[in-house]
Amino acid sequence: MAKNETPRTAITPTRADDYAEWYQQVVRAADLAENSPVRGCMVIKPWGYALWENIQRELDRMFKATGHKNAYFPLFIPKSFLEKEAEHVEGFAKECAVVTHHRLIAGPEGGLIPDPEAKLEEPLIVRPTSETIIGAAFASWVQSYRDLPLLINQWANVVRWELRTRLFLRTAEFLWQEGHTAHANEAEAREETARMLDVYATFAEQFMAMPVIRGPKTASERFPGAVDTYAIEAMMQDRKALQAGTSHFLGQNFAKASGIKFHTQSETQEFAWTTSWGVSTRLIGGLLMTHSDDDGLVLPPRLAPAHVVILPVLRGEDTRAKVMDYVDAVAAELRSVNFGGRPIEVEVDKRDIRGGDKQWEWIKKGAPLRVEIGPRDVDGNVVMVARRDRGSKDKTSMSRIEFVSKIADILGDMQTALYDKALAFRKDHAKRIDDKGAFDAYFTAKNQDKPEIHGGFALSHWCGNAACEASIKERLKVTIRCIPEHGIAGVVDADGLKDHGACVQCGAPSDQRVVFAKAY
Ligand SMILES: [Zn+2]
């Protein structure tokens, strides 16, 4: 290293220095979102919203391919609706926004106040989730077994009055989709629950390049009122788990509360079996924490708002027109190529700012490919290409024809490389632990120089007793993320999950390993 050179990263602090602050700085540097004047609510900026639109488009396609249709239900839920399902009432966080008035009037000392004369008879709750209001609609839509299954999805915003918020990971208002379905029997509803968990896992792995572990939650981690909750769980780079999506089998609980009944083929009347499932803008936080580095955001090409950014090197008026003509031609050629089912998206950054600053801006925003084109490239019919998953100075000169013909392969290669890297990271920070002392050390060690005892995912035996689970949570802030349904690559195979062992808390016999981790 030259003597004037200090190690520099585009983001300070680095992941190793202060992970939580690094996260906020990446969100800011990538221009994804910002805090709003409304406490706990975020403004999603164009680059972040385009990312959400790409997530939305792919998921929407997958939902429709599995027979679902979109609909929209009210933002407001009468308080009495939320009171219908006892366990839902019991378990659901009461941190909700409540609407009590329907008119403003001028206040005695200026400004506006809610009109005391305009108090609502029944308060309205801004939806924290829509099971109850959609249940009311289903009750009137479903009469006969012929109306089933009813497969509905809603793209919407929801509000949960969070006090400690973090952009994308936990905000008072967030965007999501919620699927709600009704079925004639238990088997079909369970099949639906599993199918949608599978859709989420496929999406996470194939589009987000984010490996996930899937399986049912323990009773204490279930959605209030659900019979079973299934989740996909991913490992972030601080080795904590992020619950990235859930699918609930609701049994007949919500159908009974909402009166979703149908006439069977044998003319009896029965309650329907329902499910619900959802993912949210939290996925963006998960995507960021899976792939990004100390230079900013890293985006998997299949979801990137732009695959390529072209940075024309415009030195002097005499070459400007020549370079821009060439840039436009390259951009047009690239846009005619398909990648992952959509045309290549190209940004051309013509802004008149320093080339180095421009480069770094796009590195921080995570554009998968940066292409520099200057007068000499035009003369040689070449382009200078840099990949976001390689070092910032790692640039390759390629012939224009070669680049256009290979771009889909390059992006596909990056997509795979990101997944493999995330999978290797998880493998390195997950292990089977059978001893209570080792388990405690795994989750309590703070010494960064000893990564082997620095935590991650522990695949350990649990007797099934809620008291053991609660005790571990209280002692170590570690929870059971899920009871894995499949082997975990490089860590434990399917048979290994069902070996005979002893509960890591109480020592009682167990034949099921679960995933223990600290979580977001
Ligand atoms: Zn136990």
Image: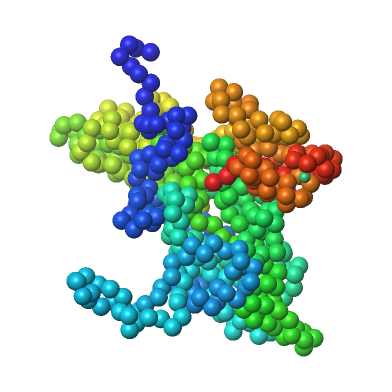
Residue farthest to the top, as pictured? 3
Residue farthest to the bottom, as pictured? 267
Quick one: 456 or 150, which is closer to the camera? 456
Relative to 338, say whether 404 is above or below: above
Number of numbered callouts drawn: 0
Residue 378's spot in the image, x, y percent? 28, 32
Relative to 82, say whether 27 is above or below: above
Q: Which residue is drawn at 48% across and 47% down?
A: 285
Residue 430's spot in the image, x, y percent? 66, 35
Residue 27 position by quadrant: top left
Residue 477's spot in the image, x, y percent? 60, 42
**Going by the image, does 484 lie left or right of 301?**
right
Residue 358's spot in the image, x, y percent? 29, 35
Q: Which residue is drawn at 19% across and 71% down?
A: 110
**Going by the image, does 418 lie left or right of 2?**
right
Residue farthest to the left, as pictured? 317
- Ligand 1 shows up in the quarter that is top right
Q: Which residue is drawn at 43% across and 67% down?
A: 97
Does any portion of residue 236 appear in the rendered image?
Answer: yes
Residue 228 position by quadrant: bottom right
Does any portion of residue 396 appear in the rendered image?
Answer: no
**Going by the image, does 268 lie left or right of 138?**
right
Please, which colouring scheme is shown?
Answer: rainbow
Q: Which residue is drawn at 62% across and 50% down?
A: 232
**Going by the image, does 38 lie left or right of 20?**
left
Residue 69 position by quadrant: bottom right
**Quarter of the figure that contains the N terminus:** top left
Quick one: 131 or 327, which is closer to the camera? 131
